[in-house]
Amino acid sequence: MSSRFLPILLAAVWLAGCPVAPPPDEAPSWGEVLALPPDQAWERTREWPEEERALKQFELLRQWADLERWIAVSAWLPEFDASALDPAQRGQLRLIQAQALLHGGEELAALTALSTLPDNDPVLKLRARIYDQLGDPENALRVRLGLAARPGDAGERDAQHRQAWGKLLAMSRTNLQAWRDRTGDATWQGWLELALLARPDAPRSISPKTKLEEWKQRHEGHPAFRWLPALAAAFERLEPDLRKLAALIPVSGDFAPIGRAIRAGIETGMRQHSGNVPELRIYDTGDPSQTPTDLYRQAVADGAQRIIGPFDKDAVTRLVRTGELPVDTISLNYLDTYSKAPGTLYQFGLLPEDEAAQAAERALAEGRRAAVVFAPAGTWGQRLDRAFTERFEAGGGTVRGHGFYFANASDHAAKIKDILKLSEGEIRRQKLEEVLGREVISRPTRRQDIDMVFLASSPHNARLFKPQLDFYYAGDLPLYATSHIYTGTPSPLQDQDLEGTLFCDIPLVLDDQLRAKLGQTLDVRRLPRFAALGADAYLLAMNLDYLKAYPEAALDGWTGGLSLRGDRRVFRALDWARFTGGRPLPAPEPERGAVAPRYRTQD
């Protein structure tokens, strides 16, 4: 090769190894934009040519919506100029806007965003979700059943029907009856009557199948006829073939009063049951000569088809450690959350954490967003504090203070003043007096960055706390509590100090008519909540197949609305009451977001 070409060749090699900068006006690739954080991604879209920019930004918003990056959608949608979009694209953008509003908790604004769109399937599905989140089951069901009745893909329509049917079964019997009685629409009345017939907790004088035939005669041509073959399976589960039932409970020893109350509840449930009642056999876990595990094996050997118990948490844990449980078992206590449960164990009990979590949900529904918590020092108080805090903060609230008090103290003033930051005001006053050399008269003020108080307490301590909260300038803050502040027996003179306090409790305790059905034995009067536990354990035992088949369904129980979660733990939806004149009176359902937060951010 001639030496005169060597410099050219070397220059070419050198140039090949150097990065070449893109032209300054070159637009970024789509993959580069999607990989960036939202704020940087939106800025990069500005580098596209003007004639492409709007469509690229629209596509970016769609991609974020598909990935459920709603914060990014909400942040950049207001900056988007939709004038270049065609009508179909503008409709898609409006749907994305409604989805972002729903995820941001602005349900009414989301409904408004949908109001200009045609009632196609995506719009109707989103509208049903909005009604769900608004706590409006009636309108949600109307939309879903309307979807199920539309022409189109049979599989999609059946899916909508199953979802709507599950929502109907999740409603309480009382709400279904009230809706049925006030509706003037024959079609809706037919749906509601059918849902009432399909409930296993409904009173029955004749068989469910006979009731279904009567319904068909009254509602000939009803839209539900299309799904009656599938619905018939629900009616079959209302009459389980359960002949032998065992209960592992303490009827002797230290826990005998609790065991007797549970037994009374089970027997009450059997008396209330209108179908075939199984033979019940009690196995005494209070007898030290046999372990609960031995008794469980004996019950299985005796032919038990379903087992209630044990009641003791350690006994449940030891039973699970023995291996698989051969029959469906409804324990009366819960394993630790990290323990693995066999597929035949259904955990049920009076779990205080459920009550604390529901107190958080109630407060959020009423517009509360900043709380302080008072709970007794120790494991129990820490559990309730954690349960309330986790649920409250998951829903967008903030817990700004945790006051752990001594349960045996006769005065909680110091703890209350510390959490309400009254002591800080006193320190400032003292310092000011030192500077001025004279007495300073000032009215103490509590912290202003909270809008509620949650209290985990016994009745005795609650009666101390509420007056002291009032005295230390927190009387205007709503007080939420669990059932543990109420003895279960009306005591107007003692409970007048709890005036205005809102608390959750089981239906049995708050409903005198329901309580009368449970009997008036000494153990039941003293331990009504455990009697209700026994009655609901029987209700669950008789309707376990139904709940497994319809995961969204709920039973009207003595301890609350009973539903089965995916981990086979039974959830209790509790009733709410407010102390008025020293007596607990039913508290109406909250109006969602009706109360605006009344606090300021404290520096």
Image: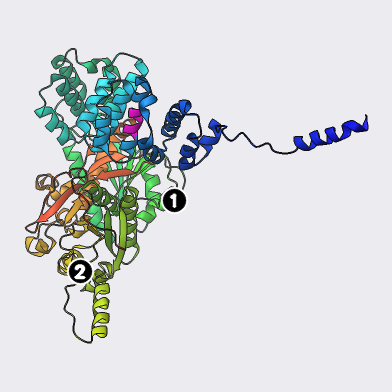
Residue bearing the label numbered 2? 445
Q: Is 345 left, or right, of 229 in this rendering?
A: right
Q: Is 436 left, or right, of 72 in this rendering?
A: left
Rate crowding at label 2 as few (under 14), some (14 to 19) or many (20 or more) other CA atoms within 10 Å.
some
The residue furthest bottom is 437
Q: Which mark is residue 123?
A: none
Where is the C terminus found, in terms of image quarters?
A: bottom left
Look at the image and give the residue range highlighted in magenta: 93-99
Give the x, y percent position of residue 96.
36, 31
Inspect this view and state whether residue 240 appears. Answer: no
Where is the N terminus found, in terms of image quarters?
A: top right
Residue bearing the label numbered 1? 338
Depth check: 108 or 147 in front?
108
Q: Is 408 left, or right, of 330 in this rendering?
A: left
Displayed quadrant of residue 136 = top left
Q: Secondary structure at mark 2?
A: loop
Q: Amino acid at mark 1?
A: Tyr
Image marks 2 and 1: residues in contact by CB distance under 8 Å: no
Q: Is residue 471 above or below residue 230?
A: below
Depth check: 598 or 204 in front?
598
